[in-house]
Image (cartoon, rainbow, N blue to C red):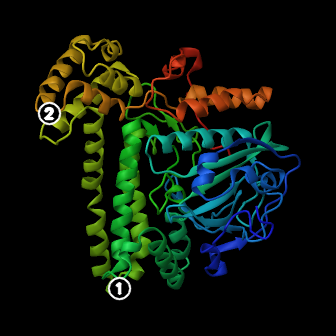
Amino acid sequence: MNQHQPPIRFDNSYAALPERFYERRDPLPVARPSLIRLNRELAEDLGIDAGWLASPEGLDMLAGNRLPDNADPIAQAYAGHQFGNFVPQLGDGRALLIGEVVDGSGRRRDIQLKGSGRTAFSRGGDGRSALGPVLREYVVSEAMARMGVATTRALAAVTSGEQVLRETVLPGGVLTRVASSHVRVGTFQYFAVRGDTEALRLLADHVIARHYPQLQGVESPYVALLAAVVEAQARLVASWMHLGFIHGVMNTDNFSIAGETIDYGPCAFMDEFHPSTVFSSIDHAGRYAYGNQPHIAHWNLTRFAETLLPLFGADEDAAVARAQERLEAFPELFNQALQAGLRRKLGFTDAREEDAELFRDLFQLMADAKADFTLTFRGLAEDAAAEDMGTARALFADAAGFDGWVGRWRERLRHEHAEPEARRASMLSANPKYIPRNHLVEATIQAAVERDDFGPFHELCEITSRPYDEQPGREIYALPPQPEERVLQTFCGT
């Protein structure tokens, strides 16, 4: 590398906004950083030399010990509803946006360090991250990306060589996260609650230029922004539902304006299906249960719309009516996205009136049988070209009820024109076999934390990087947990 060429071509737009949008803060160095895993493919997409990232100088950046001269580290300000309760000031309490890059596709991407030390928004916390949440976010976010879900990405995970105190003393780590941006509904709420209309307009203009440039120059761009975010979130939450994924903490400060999955805290994939499934240790009322996610998304979008009202015009009644019209589109947009994905999962290429009832009845059968979510759909795909439905049928104690549903499904497939083997291949590409199941993630964390053994973590990353492929010899990773392996609670990790 030319010694005069910066190792990363940062191009920092958010840091050019007024200083009330953030706090400038250098990361706090760690004692003995060590690289756990580097996402070389993502580095290449970002135009960053992976060899440099793996070097001592690159490791210093990933740990927050020394940043390139053209970095501009900031902690972003935001507010948020947490479990329905509004907190007017939250912000990055253990993370720093160190800069932005423009990737090979021309997309602007944030590079953020999580676990980089205290900021003005830490609220008494130490600003550090335990190693477990770093490993969890790395493996789950990368698996989500491989399954085609809009998500933040993991560029690197490092150990800090230090310990953090949570319920007990734990090894620390730092995650390097990549996102289209870190602007949240809570970012807009931060300025709305302060009556700072100028900041709201600047923020909305920034978001439009960065994420929705097609809206520049249109009539009523802020109304169009609300509509675009409503549509993006409808698609996103539908994609979670297709995979049995539960975010776990859908607070407005964890709700991305870019329509990406962000903040993998108490997240989990269901094993046994039930719409009321909750894993988060702090979600006692089931607010963020699997089946509630569409409702909560709509609720969060309503909070977003409220922040934009001052930008919709001086007539308050007219502004509210315009917001309501865009919000009312969410249920149908979500339903369209949900059903389109379910049709792909079940081998349908066109939409028919009876599809919704067929989907609903399958989910009811799954709930009654406590059938494994992932294995049910994968089994239907594997058996799609066979007479015997033995793979999926084995998951249902009520074999007669399942057989009755299969008969209706087969009848529905007769309206399709695809050859059986082509349909099977298409279904296999829509139904993952390997996901980062909760018990597997917990086992990798335990191995790393208790024995300093990162082998299971690396293996799980490799397996879930090919979620739809058959991987001979690794079939055990596709199985649900044994009773003694079940994970009933997940934690935020902060």
Label disc, if present, on residue 124 of the rendered structure: none
- Residue lying farthest right? 31
Q: Is residue 94 above or below residue 448?
A: below
- Left or right, residue 169 beside residue 43: right
- Is there any visible trace of residue 486 in the rendered image? yes
Determine crowd level at label 1: few under 14, some 14-19, many 20+ residues with C-alpha closer than 10 A.
Answer: some
Q: Quadrant of residue 314?
A: bottom left
Provide residue 86's location: percent of width, then percent of height.
53, 62
The answer to whether 68 appears left or right of 478 in the picture is right
Compared with 223, 145 (above or below) is: above
Amino acid type at mark 2: Glu
The amino acid marked with disc number 1 is Gly
User: Looking at the picture, how far across and down is residue 283, in whole percent?
Assistant: 53, 42
- Left or right: residue 161 versus residue 100 is right
Q: Nearer the viewer, residue 72 or 123?
A: 72
Residue that badge 1 annotates: 313
Could you tell me how many numbered marks the image carries? 2
In front: 406, or 128?
Answer: 406
Instruction: For mark 2, give the secondary structure.
Output: loop
> Which label is found at residue 416?
2
Q: Residue at x 52, y 85 (%)?
A: 198
Q: CA distance from mark 2 to mark 1?
A: 49 Å
Q: Residues within 10 Å of mark 2 (few under 14, many from 20)?
A: some
Q: Quadrant of residue 488?
A: top right
Residue reaching furthest to the front? 2
Q: Position of residue 446 (x, y in %)?
A: 71, 28
Give whichever of discs 2 and 1 has the lower sequence position.
Answer: 1
**Secondary structure at numbered mark 1:** loop
Q: Is residue 247 visible?
A: no
Furthest residue in direction bottom, as rendered: 314
| Residue at the image point whose x is 67% and y is 79% from the top | 19
